[in-house]
Image: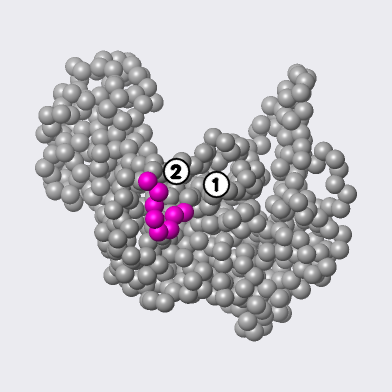
Amino acid sequence: MPFHDLNIPYSSSQPSSALSHTLLFASELGYTTVALSLTFAGKLPSTPPPIPVSTLSIPQSLTILTRLTITISDASQNHRLSSFSPAYNLLALRPTTEKALQLCCTSLECDLISLDFTQRLTYPIKFTTVAGALNRGVRFEICYAPGISSSTSDDRRNLIAGATSLIRATRGRGIIFSSEARNALGLRGPHDVINLAQVWGLGQERGKEALCEEAGKVVKLAGMKRTSFRGVVEVIDGGGTSASATVRPTNEGGAEGRKQQATTKPAVTTQRAERGKGNEVVPSNGTKRKASVSSLGGGVSTTHDESEDKPLSKREMKRRAKKARMEGKAAGPDDTHPTDGAQDTTATSEFPIKHEALADSSNKVPKKKS
Amino acid sequence: MVRLKHRYLLVNILFPDLKNAPSAPRPKGVDELPYAIQFHQPSSDRMNAKLLMQMIRNGVSELFGDYGSGMIAGSLQVKYFSQATSTAIVRVSRDHYRLVWAALTFATHLPKPVNQACVFQVVRVSGTIRKAEEEAIRRARLSIRRAKRDTKTAQKVGGSADGRAAELNEDKDINLEDVSGFADGIDDADEPGDEDESD
């Protein structure tokens, strides 16, 4: 069960032993992925300061990511966001006013929106603003440690008030929990956090979702944004498996290739929140978005594919059969081509219309067998 | 017959703050203790079940007010508390166990005479106390094996202990998933007797 804690603050003044201690405790509690976060307010420095991950002693089961959190109070600070984001695995924004929140939700490029719940929420969080963010694939974060580890009841009240209002506005979707723990004492076990979420109204499955799957989605989406071109082309280490021995039907191969692509596909559901992410994968031919999204989930059901939710229409099935035939024909003689770095998403490989740039590599996808 | 249904929470008390740790005489080489042991230290001798109960009651009253206190008052009981393993089994009524659980999450340190910073972690929620006990025993065993293995690997860095390699390999079978025990969630089903109830 991959539990994520995507906010452990890092400050350069902190001794690294304390941070290593916190990381050890996190892995002891059961977390598998952790993000170290640098916070900036106001003026951003000219170059993004690095987070020295290598100097820390990291426990084995833990994966460490880096993250930048920027406090936004007005509209003028956003001009350099895009230049900073590649230096970190995640980018989070912390709006302090309602206008800033609206700005973050609708226009600014980020992976997470994190509100500071130690301050009293002076404005109601509206469903419309939040929906805009969820559509784009931006998720909301609730940081529990400042409220938990403080002794004043005000902090706790603000945390509970803010958290419940956020949960109400998002209707439980697109929320992740993270600690923002200054030291190891602020961390809580993952099931404890899930229980808190339930007490605050998140509902049975959503609490667990909030910790594992949603956080995983955030990380994967952030990775996709950074390494791949709009989710279409992603350079994966080739591996160089010789494909001569196995001739696989393209569908299965397609499904394999899809699995290897770190399954960035969100579950293809009819929910609006997910469509934002589905749209990230833009096929390079001219099919409409909806068709491409549903065809992502398709392929042969030999591999357990959780992204196939909708029943296929006849038209879709016919189209796929035709693709499979064409791919089978074209890929047959090209069995022995070694894979080089570039690979398509299966969405593109399944389409019979071969885009010029991808014509060569489209055959290589199906044959890869890990 | 209406049966009062309970939930038994198995709670671990963890001490991440090493400087103010509870065990009074610190052996010299304490920093070389593997972390698994350091976090699961024994609690101070002054800590007992009654104090824990008071702490929970205060916590619930602070978080959930009079409503919360009233709801859990009838059935709240600390069934088991061990200082050595810093483990406790708390019984709560089934409908309101989340209140107690939340109160434990919000707790930051042990109460007055002890006053140590700690982290409470609920490890198992069970409908029967038997399952909670079994889980406690299983965890204790696992943590012993893990501690042994960690000290062995620490020692092994110094000298080559080939004879122990075999033993170490055995211990590798414990994957740490087991220790955290979260592979299948931590809720246990209701008591088997409940099926017969007709309410």
- Residue depicted at 34% across the width and 24% down the height: A238
Protein image colouring: one colour
In this orientation, does residue B196 appear? no
In this orientation, does residue B48 appear? yes
What residue range appears in magenta?
Answer: A39-46
**Whether residue B15 is situated above or below residue B178 in the rendered picture:** below
- Name the spot of residue B122 as percent of width and height, x first: 65, 59
A176 or B176: nearer the viewer: A176
- Name the spot of residue A69 as percent of width and height, x first: 43, 54
| Residue ID for mark 2 | A49
**Whether residue B61 is situated above or below residue B156 in the rendered picture:** below
- What element does badge 1 sit on? loop
Mark 2, other Cα within 10 Å: few <14 / some 14–19 / many ≥20: few
Tell me the amino acid under the disc marked 1: Ser
Tell me the amino acid under the disc marked 2: Pro
- What element does badge 2 sit on? loop
Numbered mark located on residue A12 in the image: 1
Do the CB atoms of the residues marked 1 and 2 lie less than 8 Å apart? Answer: yes
